[in-house]
Amino acid sequence: MASVAHEGHGHDHHGEHHHHEENFISKYIFSQDHKMIGKQFLMTAVFMGLVAMILSILFRIQLAWPGESSDFLSFFLGEKWAPNGVLKEDMYLGLVTIHGTIMVFFLLTGGLSGTFSNLLIPLQLGARDMASGFLNMLSYWFFLLSSLLMLASLFVESGPAMAGWTIYPPLSALPQAVSGSGLGMTLWLFSMTIFIASSLIGSLNYIVTVINLRTQGMSMTRMPLTIWAFFVTAILGVLSFPVLLSAALLLVMDRMAGTSFYLSDIIVGGEMLANHGGSPLLYQHLFWFLGHPEVYIVLLPALGLSSEIIATNARKPIFGYKAMIGSILAIGFLSFIVWGHHMFVTGMNPFLGSVFVFTTLLIAIPSAVKVFNYLTTLWKGSLVLTPAMLFAIGLVSTFITGGVTGIILADSALDIALHDTYFVVAHFHIVMGMSAVFGMFGGVYHWFPKMFGRMMNTRLGYAHFWVTLIGAYGVFFPMHFVGLAGAPRRYYDYSVYTEFDSPTADMMMDLNVVITIFAIVAALGQIIFLFNFFYSIFRGPIAPQNPWNANTLEWTTPVEHVHGNWPGALPVVHRWPYDYSKPGADTDFIPQNVPLAEGEEEH
Amino acid sequence: MENKLIILIVIILGAIAIAQLVRVYEISAKLRKTGEHEISNRDNHLNAKLMLGFMLALFIGFIYLMVAYGWTGRGLAASAEGKETDSLLNLNFVIIIAVFFFTNFLLFFFTYKYVRKPGVKAFYYPHNNKLEMLWTVVPAIVLAVIIILGLKTWNDLVAPTGKEARRIELFAKQYDWTARYAGEDNTLGKYDYKLTTDNNELGLLTSNTIDTAIYHMIYGVNGINKIQRLLNNRDTILIDSTVNALRTDLSRKERIYRLLMQMKSNHNKKYDASAWDDFIEKETLVLCEGQEYEISLRSKDVIHSAYFPHMRAQMNAVPGMPTRLKFTPTMTTEEMRKAKGNPSFNYVLMCNKICGGAHYKMKLIVVVKDKAAYKEWLKSKKGKTFKDSYFTAPAAPAAPVGPVAPAADAVVPADTTMKK
């Protein structure tokens, strides 16, 4: 990825720290410094996110104006996949699949957790670096390699993987069923295998760092909620990603070694296969055993970041700090026993279904606690609406809006009619996609000064936020109605409805045009962000040490990065991170390394 | 090509335009001597108002969509089960829409109201156990209600059907549906995918279809005999990859052949009748109003999903694993057309699990008739059972009916790997 090499930024010299001189390669490329690795993750993820966004615009054009020639499509896809500017059916599925895969894994897992866990865990805990700098570096390079493989799969002659991001076999196992299940799927599987290795190495490193490398006084109950969120996220990753790996490996065996883990009694392309006894449901169980915790692997870091941003910019302690930790732990635990709610209509035993209904709806309780705690944090605050704060508030809104529809989908009886419709697409894009992306944007705006030593442009930040919020709601809100009207997801062309119900077809086509226009506007809005981001890296005004008057330890480090983070001794922690507007204090914030004043009580 | 050039030029010009704007802004910011981290009261208040405005737009947009598309836009449910789930869905919707409005209102209103004002300090309020207990217990109670009602409905929906339910099998393959009605005995005949031949597309199990399948396996267009002949022909030279492909194919077919022979020796003729009287429909799925249906699902190739949007019914069709669903249509197609004011409306069965390129076209029109019309239609199916079509349809040339196994035995022992 060229973006890595472009990472040059303002500070070339290092201060008078005691370690060895670094050359360009060890500083910017094979860096073992957690701050640089975080930036590498961010750059790669931003690029991957951009690709996935363009893919989504390509298929949104097809959905809004099916069968109409588009220069945009022929520009990106050429004659092979968009003859005369009309998208091919197979490539539509390919675009949908790779869009989902990149967004879920590469942007929101690698990008969000990779960037901010790396950046913030050592800085907010008062550690010199991650427990293992080398493994950390390895984690990034695996991530980059898997990103490249995934991108390469877009250029394969038989097309990228086309079985949806969940790659359910037998479709993903049989090249006779769809062309993308050939080399494209092989690359997908190899890419994800490497991605899982990267994620595991990273997560183990985060866990060890959080447990072992907290500075003096930084007890677990004095950690910022960001760290709690990253910590639980890493545990979820370690416990669930290996299961995805096993699912993927069994699929590789079915594809290459003639085994029958997922295949049974199949005739495809006129060919009678001898495979017998396998179960496609086995794959689904394995996949969703990762797949559901994955939702929280994506969401928890965003919630953690927004907790920090909201408390700082409301100038108030986060309300119910211990309840927030409890909620994170409860969500983390419950996320492992709810995977079956993706499988109510797959033929799974209905009794098992009712168990999953129960456990799934339980998750609504800690989620509700989190929402009300955010609301109470805002109540009687003194809000400073920085771009990061706006994104964090936007996150709370999308978390509510997308969360409540989850209550419908978790109810197996109601899921029957809504399963795999656009209602589901709307639900998870709002609650997982938008919330996590908002959390990520909030994080970037908030910690940009820490990452690059410079400030981003606030006005452009506002413009970016408003375009994104309006665009994203404009895309996903109407989708609920398309889904309730019965539109299945992953359909290439909804004008098939004209054959049996033209008023509904009209409704879907109208809303699809609206959705696509909002999507294009929102996508164009991201240009503002990209511009602001790259421009500010080089030309932004130099950041003050603690621009947001925040309490956490990262703002006690010098603006210019040094290896080991603090030039002198490590800071000592005396209080929790949320002493904002504490009565009796001179300022409206008291950093964690300030000792308790005489007679002062800890919260 | 020209278009591509224009697109590129527009992108480049756009980037330059933003760059210029930012520079103007930066110069003016330098003149004002404020940093990017200092948010002016003007910006704060502007964004706070915009937040409130956005909330109003969101709420009005939501209400507009509900008015424009009629509550949730689902239309009437056309089955007894659908009516039950729809009323439950409505109840759930009332709850979640109330929560949506209430919490989003608080969020945006607080943002508006508590935006920083000079001289006003935030209220230090780290926790309150009573409040936290309140919003743990209240959601828990609401959810308990939702869970109990939901599971009650779910148990009804997945309960076994009675004897009087009519049995239909929906057979899915890329990219169409085939319906098999159980015939007069209301018992679906057994099947095995290995029995699939041109005149037995659903692989139904009878003594005759076993024989035909065995015959095909040996003498078919790409049967065992043909492959053996190709491999043993000394006059042709095959490249290695072809030889390997043929060998793989041969060993697979031999394995299937052995299984077929086992099936033949274990087969009990008394099962034949239940398959012979089934009848197969490919154009439309015709159902009877007020009749409960027990629908079995089967897939030939990949996972499909039988989705009846108007009946609010759905279940996946999984290769190698039988699945089921049930529903009772309560409105005929005619009644629904009148209710919708749309004379061309039809019920439909769609595929709702990604299954390949033409996934979106995979559907079957469903017609619900009243009892009299249904009986009429049923009469027209007399003489169109599987047995009738199997023995009268112009069968594929290489598919004679009758015992052919002895012939097969005579040919195959040439291969020593074959065991019986």
Image (tube, rainbow, N blue to C red):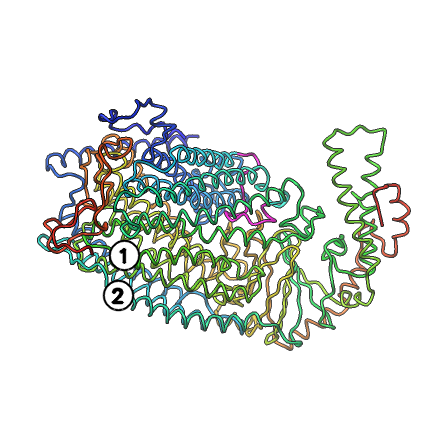
Under circle 2, the secondary element is helix
Work out whether residue B367 or residue B134 is closer to the camera in this orientation and state it: B134
Under circle 1, the secondary element is helix
Residue type marked 2 = Asn
The picture quadrant where one finds residue B201 is bottom right
A83 vs A295: above or below: above
The answer for which chain carries disc 1 is: A
Give the percent coordinates (x, y) of residue A180.
Answer: 57, 41
Q: Is residue A159 magenta?
A: yes
Camera sees residue B367:
yes
Q: Where does label 1 land, which residue? A: A321
Q: Where does label 2 land, which residue? A: B129
The answer for which chain carries disc 2 is: B
Q: Please, what is the dominant secondary structure of the magenta stretch?
A: loop
Q: Residue at x 59, y 45 (%)?
A: A251
Residue type marked 1 = Tyr
